[in-house]
Image (cartoon, rainbow, N blue to C red):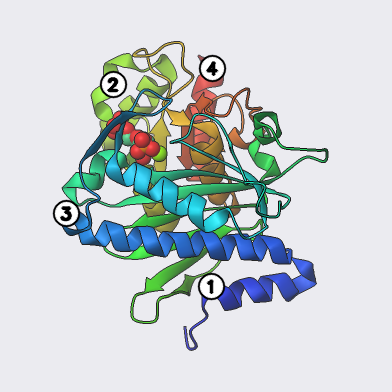
Amino acid sequence: MSKKISLTRYLVEQQRMDGHIPAQLRLLLEVVARACKRISLTVNKGALGGGLGSAETENIQGEMQKKLDIIANEVLIEANEWGGHLAAMASEEMDGIYIVPNRYPQGEYLLLFDPLDGSSNIDVNVSIGMIFSVLIKPEGPGVSAQDFLQPGNQQVAAGYCVFGPQTTLVLTVGDGVAMFTLDREQGSFILTAENMHVPDDTQEFAINMSNMRHWDAPVKRYIDECLQGKDGPRGKDFNMRWVGSMVADVHRILTRGGVFLYPWDKREPDKPGKLRLMYEANPMGWLIEQAGGAASNGKQRILEVQPGKLHERVSVFLGSKNEVQRIARYYSEA
Ligand code: AHM
Ligand code: MG
């Protein structure tokens, strides 16, 4: 790329292009990016920044919270509550919604986030990230958790930030997927890839294999065929990668293709899956679709799943289109 394009310039140009994004949405995305820079600094300091270790508290999902889960959540709320662009926020780390306090103007957007994705990787210096999704508050007075319960196809912006060897922000406003890399000397995100594309085919899958005995038949069939490689029905060898941070696994897939699976399993049969629909699967699903891939729960497009509650869970199959379609076919044949 000959001249450097900052995130600010990219968003201003998006705003100018046929009013592609409204000014308030541009502000929102800039504020989210600024919060990501702050979280990135804390992540980079590691043990020196007081961000490692357990907070000794549990979130609504019954998961132990790490100090960094709570720090990142606070950074995102503080950064976003005063700008006048939001009506309310929802997070993996908060039971209910956070309504913008009365002392600040209320905007028309709703922001959802997983402030720190891949929490089990924080203390071992492996890539982690944050994921976000933006919806428009339905018309009417006040704001309630009900206002958030919109399917993913209603998102107006979505993205994630990976805190890895590089800090990388990836986003969509419904016009393809763009990637920005944090230039630490300048303190700004610089455009480093546009129109990211997930190849239709792949020879790489990502799944937590230790859960194999708990999977249902279609997932067992799909992975079994991958493992048979050249000698099996697929006629080609597959490679496996599993970072254990969805952001890092999805980032790899957006960069070079692949398929990511977090299926329903028998460990918790009453839950539709481990990952959360509204602030993990929906934003990632939309990004992958915007890059030409597919995202399904095995039975329907993730973006068409109607959420029944804020912290709803879902099975996730996303990435290279032909693999995701194959898994969906195995479900329909089962
Ligand atoms: P988190 O948001 O609490 O970090 O949990 C979600 C993470 C995903 O990033 C990742 O894909 C998955 O959980 C890893 O699960 P497992 O521990 O089964 O490997
Ligand atoms: Mg997560």
Q: Which residue is mark 2?
A: 212
User: What residue is disc 4 on?
Assistant: 333
**Lower position in the chain sequence, tag 4 or tag 3:** 3
Quarter-of-image position of residue 14: bottom right
Pointer 2 or 3: first along the chain: 3
Distance of label 4 from label 2 (alpha carbons): 20 Å
Could you say whether the residue bearing mark 3 is in a helix, strand or loop?
helix
Q: Mark 4 or mark 3, which is nearer to you?
A: 3
| Crowd band around label 3 with a 10 angstrom C-alpha radius: few (<14), some (14–19), many (20+) | few
Amino acid of disc 2: Met
Q: Position of residue 53 (x, y in %)?
A: 20, 42
User: Marks 3 and 1, Cα distance to the nearest angstrom?
Assistant: 30 Å
Residue denoted by label 3: 47
Q: Which of the 4 image quarters holds residue 294?
A: top right
> Is residue 150 among what the camera can see?
yes
Dividing the picture into quadrants, the one containing residue 114 is: top left
Mark 2 neighbour class, 10 Å CA radius: few under 14, some 14 to 19, many 20 or more? some
Is residue 224 found left or right of 105 in the rendered image? left
Q: CA distance from mark 2 to mark 3?
A: 35 Å
In the picture of the structure, the residue carrying the numbered disc 1 is: 7
Ligand 2: image quarter: top left
User: Mark 4: which secondary structure?
Assistant: helix
Could you tell me the amino acid type at mark 1?
Answer: Leu
Q: Position of residue 262 (x, y in %)?
A: 40, 30
Q: Position of residue 227 (x, y in %)?
A: 27, 31
